[in-house]
Amino acid sequence: MNTPQLAAIAFGAAVLAAPASAEKPALTQDSGAPVVDNQNSKTAGAFGGVLLEDFHLVEKLARFSRERIPERVVHARGTGAEGEFVVTDTAITAYTAASLFAEQGKKTPVFVRFSTVIHPKGSPEGLRDPRGFATKFYTDQGNWDLVGNNLPVFFIRDAIKFPDMVHSLKPSPVTNRQDPNRFFDFFSHLPESTHMLTQVYSDLGTPAGYQFMDGNSVHAFRLVDKAGEVVFAKFRWKSHQGVKTLTAEEANAESFNFATDSLYADITAGKHPKWDLHAIILKPEDIDKLDFNPFDATKDWPEDGSVFETVKIGTMTLNRVPNNFFSSTEQVAFAPGVMVPGIEASPDRLLQGRLFSYADTQRYRVGTNYQMLPVNAPHVPVRNGNQDGRLNFADQRGEVNYQPSRNVDDNAFVDSPAIVAARYQLDGIAERRAIEKTLPFQQAGEFFRALDGAQQANLISNLAGDLGQVRNPEIKEIMVTHFYLADEDYGTRIAEAVGVELGAVQARAGAIRQASL
C-alpha cells in the first residue's frame, strides 16, 4: 500500500469523524444514518469512476427514480384539505345505526380530496370536467369513504361500460389528443348520457373554485337501523359559500392552479369553507311510485317532497392545509366499499362495479398495504389476520393470524354479532339485461328548462364548441336528436349551432318515440 492510498484512507476517517453542525439537525439516509457528504460522490481517485459502494449515492438515485407512483386513471388532478364533521341534527338516527351520526355535536375528523375526473395530473384546473368530491371520515367505527362528484348524476348506469367511457374521453391512442369525435361516437350509443352531458356542458362543468360547488354521492346506499330496517339514501353536500361557476371564457383565463390557490388561501386566512351534509331518503315501499329506476346513476333524486324526504345531518368545515401534498393528496385512497355499520351498498349497477374497482386500483397504484399510510389509516385499532405484502409496517405479533381461535392470545379476535346488517330477498333469473324505466331524456330536459336564459346560451355554446368538431354527420345527428328529445328548444338550438338539418332530427326523434310506445 503506497503513501497516497494511506493519505486517502486517513482523510476519509477524518471526514467520518467530523461532527454535524450544532445549528441544524444532521441530514440522514432513509435508514437514519447521518450523511457524511451530500455534495460529492465517492470516486476512485480524482480521475477515477464513481464507486458502487457509495451507498448514499445509489440509495438517493434509486429513491429518486421511484418518487412517482402511477397517476390515477381518473381523478388524477386533485387537491386535498383536512377538517372535521360535526353532527347538527339527529333525525338521521331513525334510519341508520352509523355511530358517527349518533348524537348532536359529535365530531369526526375528515380528509377531503377535490379533483377533475378525466384530465391528467399536470392539467390546468379550469378545464371543463366533472369535479370529484371525496370525503374520508375517520369515525369511531373505522373509516367511511363518501366518494362522489359535484354533479348529482353520471354518464353511464352500468360499470361494465366504465372502461369504454374513460377510454373514449381520454386522449386518442394514436394522436394523444382528447377528441370529441371519439367520445361523441361513444355517447351516441348511450342515450342515458344526455343528462350528464347537459350538466357538464353547463357552467357547472367549470366551477369558480372547489369551495363553490356542492357534492353528491351520485349512488344510492342502504341505511340500516339498529333493528335491521332499511331505507335507501343519496348523500348531498350543500356549500355554505354558494354554488358559483365560470363561463368558458372566464375558466380559460384563470391561472393554472387557481382552484387550489383559492381554497388554500381561504383556509389559511381563516375563511374556513363549510358544507352541510344531507341525506335524501327513499323508503322501499315508495320505489314503485317512481317513473324511473332509483338505482340508475344517470338519474337525480328530486328534493320536492313528493316521494323523497331530505334530512340534514351535519356540517363539515375544512380548516387545515396538508403539510405535504404527496403524503396526503396523492397517497390518499378512496373506495366506495369502505363503509361503516349502518351504511351498505344498494343495487346500483355502477356502484356495484366501483365496490371492486376502486379498492383494486388503490392496491395497484399505492400498494397492498395502502390503508396503513397515515392519511388512509383509521383512527381506531385494526385487528385481523391480514399480513405481509410490500411496505407492511404493522407491528404484528403473536402466533394467531387466523380466526376463529380458542387460543388465549391478543390476536384471537371475535365477531361483532351485535351489529345488525341488512337482510333482503334475492330472486330472479341470472341474465344480462338492461334496466327497465330508462327515461333517458326526461331529467335532462328538466335541468335545461331550469336554467336561466344566459345559462342556457352558455350550455348551447359550450356543447356546440365540441360537438361541432365531430366529422361524422350521423353521430352529430344522433347526439342532436338526444338533446331534442330532452327539450325541443334545446335540440333546435344545438342543431342550428352545429349545422344539423332539423327535419332529419325530428324524423329520427319521431322514430325513437314510436319505438318506445
Image (cartoon, rainbow, N blue to C red):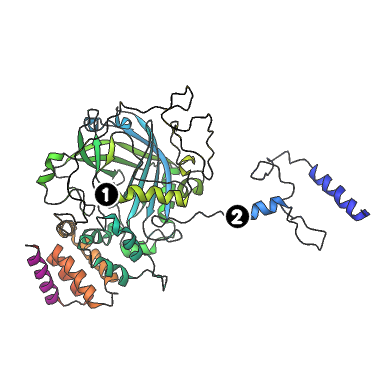
Q: For mark 2, give the secondary structure.
A: helix
Q: Which residue is mark 1?
A: 218
The reply to whether the magenta stretch includes residue 514 is yes
Q: Label 2 is placed on what type of residue?
A: Phe
Looking at the picture, how far across and down is residue 157, in whole percent?
A: 24, 55
As drawn, is 414 to the left or to the right of 155? right
Outermost residue, right direction?
3
Relative image position of residue 116 (x, y in whole percent)? 37, 56
Question: Is 464 rendered above or below residue 386?
Answer: below
Q: Quadrant of residue 309?
A: top left
Task: Give the residues in magenta.
Answer: 502-515
- Relative horizontal placement of residue 416, taking residue 307 as reference (left or right): right
The image quadrant where one finds the C terminus is bottom left
435 or 248: nearer the viewer: 435
Residue 469 is covered by the magenta coloring: no
First in residue order: circle 2 vs circle 1: 2
**Residue type indicated by callout 1:** Val
Counting the numbered discs, the total is 2
Q: x and y percent of residue 139 in the render?
A: 38, 33
Per the picture, the main secondary structure of the magenta-coloured stretch is: helix
- Within-10-Å neighbours for mark 1: few <14, some 14–19, many 20+: many
Q: CA distance from mark 2 to mark 1?
A: 39 Å
x%, y% of residue 334?
A: 39, 46
Disc 2 residue crowd, few under 14, some 14–19, many 20+, Cα 10 Å:
few
Residue 241 versus residue 301: which sits nearer the camera?
301
Residue at 83% of width from left, 59% of height from top?
Answer: 45
Element type at mark 1: loop
Q: Which residue is mark 2?
A: 64
